[in-house]
Amino acid sequence: MKKQRIYCSYCGNKIISKEQDGKARDYCPTCETFYYENPLPVASTIVVNDQREVLLVKRKKDPYKDMWCLPIGFAETGEEVHEAALRELEEEAGVTGEIIRLIDVDTIDNYFYGSLAIVTYEVRVIGGTVRPGDDATDARYVPIMELPELAWSSNEKAVRIYIDLYKDSWAMIDSFKQLYPEISASDSLTQVTNEQKHFLSNVLIKILSTDNAEITGKWSGEINVKVPKLDRHMSVLRQINGKILVSLQKHLQGEIRGNDYAEFILIGAELKEYGIPLPELLTALALSRKTIWTHVIKKRILASPLEIYTTLELNNRIIFIYDRIIYFLAKGYGV
């Protein structure tokens, strides 16, 4: 269990509890110094292979000894959180990787460590062999739909978000394979001509421009039901969602590229000033992406290989653009 502070780290005298801003804090009357309990930064990774199995490690030490979890650990002084995620992945599971996208940011109060800010990334393996590290007794891939109870609730939340992110694409790939058994891997679906890509872009551009109000209205309804905490910020969020839809159109028209979303750094900083929590914002953006996706697939009938691939490719494009926007928004929050 986390030990309570007893003595001042500056003068060595005994500290007391004193109220500040409506909250009891540790206070040194000699130094006249308050101690602030800021959440400790923790990094975790979601690694999924082609068989839709998640890389898990079994904990060797407390807390949660002998329970399974995602590779996870504290960021060290002077280390970026994403760097800590990759380091912990190699130390705990024996593989090296590269960041694909930010999946979730969650804050929890843990009985052992205190307040934690857990940042989870999706990572692609680029080297190494799966093996347990110093802090693990086992490391292995487990089917994503058959996971054991995980040590950290934030891990389970991140996996749910990951599944929601990919389930539509998985369903499309599975449908394609059933219709065309000769297709053995998703890589086989990547052969598409420039003419088809141009067609896909035009389809999505037209949908975004003509159905903007309808898409935003559906998204607002999802927010009211699933993230009611953001209801009082809806006027601001509607504006941001409008900017995102415009950015989607510009990207598909070739007017902006993957790294040209720097304006969202300032937007992220503004949203932080408004008091909009980043975890809830990420959920809202996931719902925004999903709303576009569900709206698009209702416009298509999945009757041919091109139409099936069209829907899948459109979804992949939406995911990529949202990943870039989320990355820059998170930078605005300081993550």
Image (cartoon, rainbow, N blue to C red):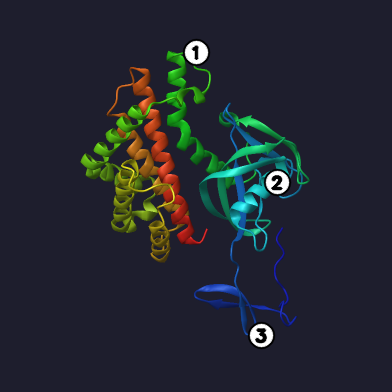
The extreme bottom residue here reads: 30
Residue 272 locus on image (x, y percent): 43, 63
Q: Mark 3 is on which residue type?
A: Cys
Q: Kindly report the distance in space between the C-alpha atoms of the residues bearing marks 1 and 3.
A: 74 Å
Q: Is residue 282 left or right of residue 12?
A: left
Q: Which residue is mark 2?
A: 64
Q: Is residue 28 left or right of residue 131?
A: left
Under circle 1, the secondary element is loop
* Mark 2 → mark 3, Cα distance in angstroms: 38 Å
Amino acid of disc 2: Tyr
Amino acid beneath label 1: Glu
Q: Nearer the viewer, mark 1 or mark 3?
A: 1
- Residue 118 x/y as whole percent: 58, 53
Q: Nearer the viewer, mark 2 or mark 3?
A: 3
Which of discs 1 and 2 lies nearer the camera? The answer is 1
User: For residue 112, what is the image quadrant?
Assistant: bottom right
Q: Residue at x 39, y 49 (%)?
A: 227
Query: What residue is pinned by disc 1?
Result: 182
Sequence-wise first label, 2 or 3: 3
Lower sequence index among marks 1 and 2:
2
Compared with 208, 303 (above or below) is above
How far apart marks 1 and 2 lie (CA) works out to 45 Å
Label 1 crowd bin: few (<14), some (14–19), many (20+), radius 10 Å: few
Which residue in the structure is indicated by mark 3? 31
Mark sitting earlier along the chain (1/3) = 3
Q: Dot 2, how many residues are within 10 Å of its Cα: few (below 14), some (14-19), or many (20+)?
A: some
Camera sees residue 287 = yes
Residue at image point 56% right, 41% down = 156
Label 3, secondary structure: give it: loop
